[in-house]
Image: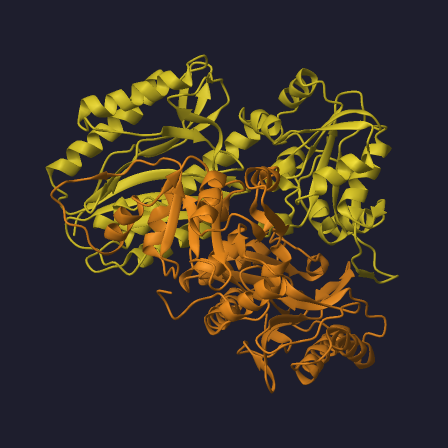
Chain colours: A yellow, B orange
């Protein structure tokens, strides 16, 4: 390992490999490749199709290896990657002047251009498995990032290996965050809160949802994150769950709903806040207070060992008791990390138990068509003794004077 | 059809359906769902896993239909969608006050909450095919957006239908752009050029790549687009093909390479420009002029009927003759649209022929490790009489005074 700030929960991965009697596991989806190696393979993140893998053998069964296209090796060289064994596939042409001495990332890139190379991604994966001495046994493969037919082709090419779909195993490993993951999630939560503040700073009569959206995303960019989720709606449009900013103008009495979050060093935020432009009336205040009470109840009951289903019940019952008797939800939150929806999902039917190290979005959205949508959503970490909030603001109704 | 600004090339899709003797086709990947319907299904674009489909029967065989999760129906209601038949899957709770009269998007959303609903995405797709009267015959299915195993499950559930992988057919339809697509591509090309200008406006001794990156993305956001590709490198870092902005400081004599492009109304840009901060020396000037001559040659030879392989040869030969005798490339460009790499790819081995309506990125990158990377990349439309550039700037070396 080249870095002490690794994202991967190595211990948990090894436990899972042992539990599932796997000799190795292969990450293929963008979030799993980044999670297992620190390598963010640009092309794989912005398009469907480009392949990059991380092969991770069980302890004592070989060294982890990155398998990626030659055209992306500079990113391996230039990022905080903790896997040093790399294999490439495909051709990519880079020149080098005979008299220039290379330094830092250029030097690392030049070395990587000499690693073993195969014609295509699956041939490289087969070679990597063989190089690790894995020619039979059981290998988990994250099926999500493969293209159709690749799983079958791989099984045909290495018939003595039993390949097992393993996306759910990796999702399960990812649910308990490492310190570096919590650090990044905390950063993006705060960047998102500041972006809401920046958006509200331009709120005035006649300003459009799109103008607030621009102010929101601009602040996210200024704080070194990238825009992802930017649902911002005024008045009756705030009741559209996925509202995309439009030319709707702000009017006195409007609710402004934010369900938003950027990406900082590949980690996502997803938080919600409600502002009122002038007096929104007593019903909005009462309903919002009920939704906030639900979140506050979540802070009281979330702790390691708590049943997810009990959290769901406690939150929904609180919202009902505190002011929205007819409140209905299919979930009151979800994990978050490299993916916007990590495990667990906070549902009534869940059989899961909370554990220290989970990072959760807890949320109580309420959509009333034609009137308004209200929502409080916080990001929190489950700690041994309860809850640590990643937020600097409470979920109170934010009053903006017209 | 509800709109006259549709993205889909309907005529070309129908030709392909007839040519492949298909009774219908199903789009599943995010770009194909948006392309065929105008519906941008947020969750599908920002995560792997969420499903949304467009079923498009051959002429005379039924009406097109959108199949999406109940939680995304507000986006169908609130966007310029030209398919009016919709089917949903899964549960999502929205309230409605009995005395509030709905208007516009809220009303459309309320109607959509009453469309036929199935438990899961494949059940909804099966029901949609049955509803269109398609119970046997040949159906193309875009295999890229499906999760592993779904193709097989679908085939098992409708054994009298022959399902045929059809991602490549849709990619082929997408290669000839409609007027609305060219409009959006033209907009994002110009937004990206202005973002480069905004980044260069902050160039001064000691400024970091990251600071230029922030200025670049901020302008993209201000112009109503979203950041996607932002490779910006100084000096020796400009030779890293996918360079992500770092803390490297700008020094006199540095080359600044931009390989960048945002997303406007879901359409991508991918352009490249080179700036020099102070005098970069005669070799950079000579090499850059050779790369630019390659692009200028592309403008001369690109026309409907031209062989892609001939374009490749003409461009590479020009660069070699004009100053980089050892120039090597695997491609000199590619199509662009909803995907950053649409068909065709401009390679030496291509057997493809250019057609009017293609939008292409033509590019001549040159990476010399340890010294600099140079690159010119323009976005152009193939027109009946030649080339229309989507750029407002030429690819000349941009000289920035320290």
Q: Residue at position x 74%, y 72% from top?
A: B284
Going by the image, does A253 lie left or right of B10? left
Which quadrant of the view contains residue B196?
bottom right
In this rendering, the answer to whether B96 lies above or below A327 is below
Is residue A224 something one can see in this rendering?
no
Which quadrant of the view contains residue B255?
bottom right
B301 or A74: which is nearer to us?
A: B301
Q: Position of residue A339 (x, y in %)?
A: 52, 37
A76 or B132: which is nearer to us?
A: B132
Q: Position of residue A107 (x, y in %)?
A: 79, 50
A22 or B283: which is nearer to us?
A: A22
Q: Position of residue A18 (x, y in %)?
A: 70, 17
Q: Residue at position x 55%, y 76% from top?
A: B391
Q: Position of residue A33 (x, y in %)?
A: 65, 38
A32 or B173: which is nearer to us?
A: B173
Which quadrant of the view contains residue B174?
bottom right
Q: Residue at position x 19%, y 24% from top?
A: A322
Q: Residue at position x 73%, y 35% from top?
A: A83
The quadrant the C terminus of chain B occupies is bottom right
Is residue A317 something one can see in this rendering?
yes
The quadrant the N terminus of chain B occupies is bottom left
Going by the image, does A91 lie left or right of B251? right
Tag count in the figure? 0
In this rendering, the answer to whether A86 lies above or below B165 is above
Going by the image, does B128 lie left or right of B177? left
């Amino acid at each position: 390992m080249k870095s002490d700030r690794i994202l991967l929960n190595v211990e948990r991965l090894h436990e899972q490999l042992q539990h599932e009697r796997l000799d190795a596991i292969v990450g293929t989806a963008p979030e799993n490749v980044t999670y297992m190696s620190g390598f963010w393979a640009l092309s794989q993140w912005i398009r469907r199709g480009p392949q990059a893998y991380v092969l991770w053998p069980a302890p004592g069964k070989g060294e982890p290896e990155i398998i990626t296209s030659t055209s992306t090796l500079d990113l391996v060289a230039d990022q905080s990657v903790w896997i040093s064994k790399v294999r490439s596939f495909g051709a990519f042409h880079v020149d080098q002047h005979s008299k220039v001495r290379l330094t830092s990332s250029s030097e690392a890139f030049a070395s990587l251009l000499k690693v073993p190379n195969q014609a295509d991604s699956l041939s490289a994966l087969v070679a990597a498995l063989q190089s690790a001495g894995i020619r039979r046994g059981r290998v988990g493969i994250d099926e999500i990032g493969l293209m159709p037919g690749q799983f079958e082709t791989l099984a045909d090419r290495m018939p003595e290996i039993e390949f097992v779909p393993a996306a759910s195993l990796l999702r399960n490993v990812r649910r308990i965050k490492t310190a570096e993951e919590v650090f990044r999630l905390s950063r993006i939560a705060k960047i998102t809160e500041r972006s809401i503040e920046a958006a509200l700073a331009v709120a005035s009569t006649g300003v459009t949802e799109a103008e607030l959206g621009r102010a929101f995303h601009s602040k996210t960019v200024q704080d070194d994150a990238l825009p992802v989720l930017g649902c911002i709606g005024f008045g009756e449009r705030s009741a559209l769950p996925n509202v995309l900013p439009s030319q709707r103008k702000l009017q006195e009495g409007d609710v402004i709903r934010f369900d938003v979050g950027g990406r900082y060093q590949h980690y996502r935020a997803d938080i919600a806040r409600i502002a009122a432009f002038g007096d929104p009336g007593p019903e909005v205040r009462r309903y919002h207070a009920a939704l906030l009470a639900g979140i506050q109840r979540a802070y009281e009951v979330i702790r390691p060992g708590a049943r997810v289903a009990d959290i769901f019940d406690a939150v929904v019952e609180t919202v009902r008791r505190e002011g929205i008797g007819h409140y209905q939800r299919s979930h009151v939150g979800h994990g978050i990390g490299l993916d916007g929806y990590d495990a667990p999902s906070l549902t009534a039917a869940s059989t899961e138990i909370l554990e220290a190290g989970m990072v959760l979005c807890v949320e109580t959205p309420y959509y009333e068509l034609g009137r308004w949508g209200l929502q409080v959503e916080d990001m929190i970490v489950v700690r041994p003794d309860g809850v640590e909030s990643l937020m600097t603001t409470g979920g109170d109704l934010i009053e903006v004077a017209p």
